[in-house]
Amino acid sequence: MGFLQILSARKVYQTPEGSSVQALDDVTINIRNNEFLTLLGPSGCGKTTLLKCIAGFEDLDGGDLILDSKSLRSVPPHKRPFNTVFQNYALFPHMTVEQNVAYGMEVAGVSKVERDRRAGEALDLVGLSGFGGRRPTQLSGGQQQRVALARSLVLKPKVLLLDEPLSALDRKMRETMQIELKNLQHAVGITFVFVTHDQEEALAMSDRIAVLAQGRLQQLDTPTEVYDKPANEFVANFVGTSNMFAGTVASISGDRVILETGNGRRLAATSTAFRVGDQVRLVLRPEHLTILARDETGDADVPAIEGRVRETVFVGSTMQVHADIGHGRTALVSHPHTRRGSSDIAPGAEVRIGYSAASGHLIPMRSA
Amino acid sequence: MAGDRFMAARKRNALLLLLAPISIILGIFFLIPLGIVVVYSFLEPGLYGGVEWTWYPYNYGRILGWPLNDYEEFDPIYLKIFATSLKYALMTVVFSLLICYPAAFWVSRRSERWKGFVLFLITLPFFASLLIRIYAWLLLLRPTGFVNTALEAAGIISQPLDLLFSGTAVVLGMVYIFTPFMFLPIYANVEKLDFSLVRASQDLGASPIQTFLRVILPLTAPGMVAGSIIVFIPALGNFIVPSLLGGAKVQMTGNLIERSFLQSRDWPFGSALALLIMASVVVVLMIQTVKAGRAKGGRPA
């Protein structure tokens, strides 16, 4: 049971050239109370359009938006109990920080005493007490970000909408703000709907992630589920990096599935959703693959993949090994460099790549 | 240390060099004539034109109320004409604002190609002489002109309206002339207005009217103020429009100045009138400067 329900949302844009673009195509999401939901997708996937439709800046062409069992379709943006943190912050340049934060209360007719008190509290909450008298232009990007947050949170919205708010910050600042935002959301107990194209950001912050592509909802689940069990090829590629193999289910015993690729390669996976003969794709994350030492056998009946190291990239915590595994294919292995046998991995070396069947995730071949 | 001083000196020299052309031009063609006008305004008019080199504050006296007894008398007509000029200049400002402000928003939301075209249209009148364009209005407004003929043909009026040679005609003509000068600064301001601020205001619960009054208006005010000043100053001293479209009925200070110099050949009196207009413009500009300073947070720059 959702608290804010997006039901079969549809939105079509007319391009200046006369063609139409389906920005949202039958998107249904039940947003729960107090959750941190991320709308994740590449640019043009419809995530910002969806956010604008929730805020009321755009109207849906079909479907509905329901809050506490009432439709919001005919409610103008200034009457919706939602607030937005804009990508460029959109702070009013002709007002001080305090006036910015108090703006929403002022137009709502809250008394001056009450306004001052609550604006002060909100600025405390985001760690900007003492900055009230400054102009937004006198603040750093991160500080402006906090003012925008305070300005929205002070109104205690039912849902806080965040439109890629961290994209303009540098990497260090972004990581700090990710943690702060998450803590803030717990502290204030407000539902956050966060839009981003950055999958790491989405994985780090969200309670649930809605992956969107070409206006369609691809998957809606917790970060671990989205990462470990991507619903389809798009999600597997967009969230994290994947090694993918297309094949046909050759045999099933219990939940152990053996599939055979077109080149006759036999691979193992764990799933109960398929039958013998189904066309499937196997997703193996680079960290699920390991380079086996010479005397290692790996998982019992999982055939190791034979390959030759083409290139190694040391990234600190792991060694990224690109290995040619025949038929023009490359496997990416994320190999912990403290692991046994690491010293043998060098370009040109013959290696065997092992994995456990439990880590092999199967997705259906995209139906034509 | 020595390097710093060297750099500072270089900077100063560069500044002087860059400012030299404008300083020389303004010095020769603005300050010197202005000095002449100031000096003349305190001299006695010669009997057959020219000036007598004697101290004579009564040029101002004639206008403001301390005439030289038994020779000149104080006539409130000059102050009345000045008040009329102020009224027409302010009306011109208000009407051109009312036309240009919404138009600027409309244009700023068009596609780039449309914008270019509209801006071209706005500069188009400058291709024709001002005099010719004012004469065109004469033809439009006269009793047998286009407006009256059209209204009569449509059966709205039975006899021609008295459009020409009225305050209305003068304001109409000035609004027509000065609209581009009002439009361009407002448009430049409206064009760079960040529309996400309007969204933010709505998002924070402000009604459309609140959003307009508290966000759009304050952020576009500088353009309106700049446009108003650019229109007000030449409108106040304008003499072509009132002399062609106002006829004998409408007098503005500009006409008075023109007549003092060219017909009565009373240069000192004309100079005094001109300086009074200039003084009122300077007052307006000073108020604006002080206000702009305060809007920037009250901190001196």
Image: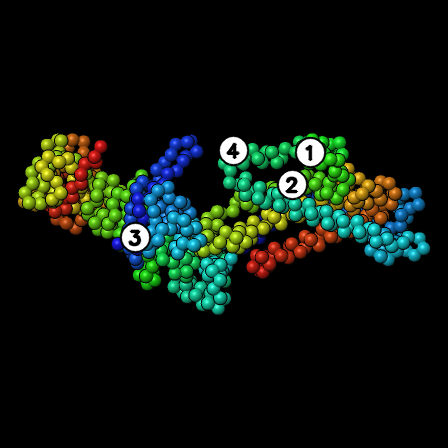
Q: Residue at x 51, y 38 (%)?
A: B110
Q: Amino acid at mark 2?
A: Thr
- Name above or below for residue A96 compared with residue B131: below
Q: Is residue A154 left or right of residue B123?
A: left
Locate the C terminus of chain B by quadrant.
bottom right
Q: CA distance from mark 1 to mark 4?
A: 41 Å
Q: Earlier in the sequence, mark 1 or mark 4?
A: 4
Q: Nearer the viewer, mark 1 or mark 4?
A: 1
Does the image show residue B63?
yes
Q: How many angstroms separate mark 2 from mark 4 (CA)? A: 22 Å
| Relative side of A295 to A134, left or right | left
Q: Residues within 10 Å of mark 1 (few under 14, many from 20)?
A: few
Are the numbered discs 1 and 4 placed on the same chain, yes or no? yes
**What's under tag 3, amino acid-wise?**
Ile
Question: Which three-letter amino acid code belongs to the residue tagged 4?
Answer: Arg
Q: Which mark is residue B179?
A: 2
Instruction: Specify the label residue B155 is tagged with.
Output: 1
The chain that hosts pointer 1 is B
Q: Is residue A325 visible?
A: no
Packing grade of label 3 (10 A; few <14, some 14-19, many >=20) is many
The single residue placed furthest to the right in the displayed view is B70
Q: Image point 30% across, 44% down: which residue?
A: A8
Mark 1 residue element: loop
Position above or below: A61 against A144: above
- What residue does disc 3 label? A31
Q: Are marks 3 and 1 on the same chain?
A: no
In this rendering, the answer to whether B214 lies above or below B192 is below
Q: Is there a contact, CB below 8 Å, between mark 3 and mark 1?
A: no
Tag of residue B113 = 4
| Picture coordinates of residue B152, whole percent (x, y) | 71, 33
| Local crowd size for mark 2, using a 10 Å CA cut-off: few (<14), some (14–19), many (≥20) | many
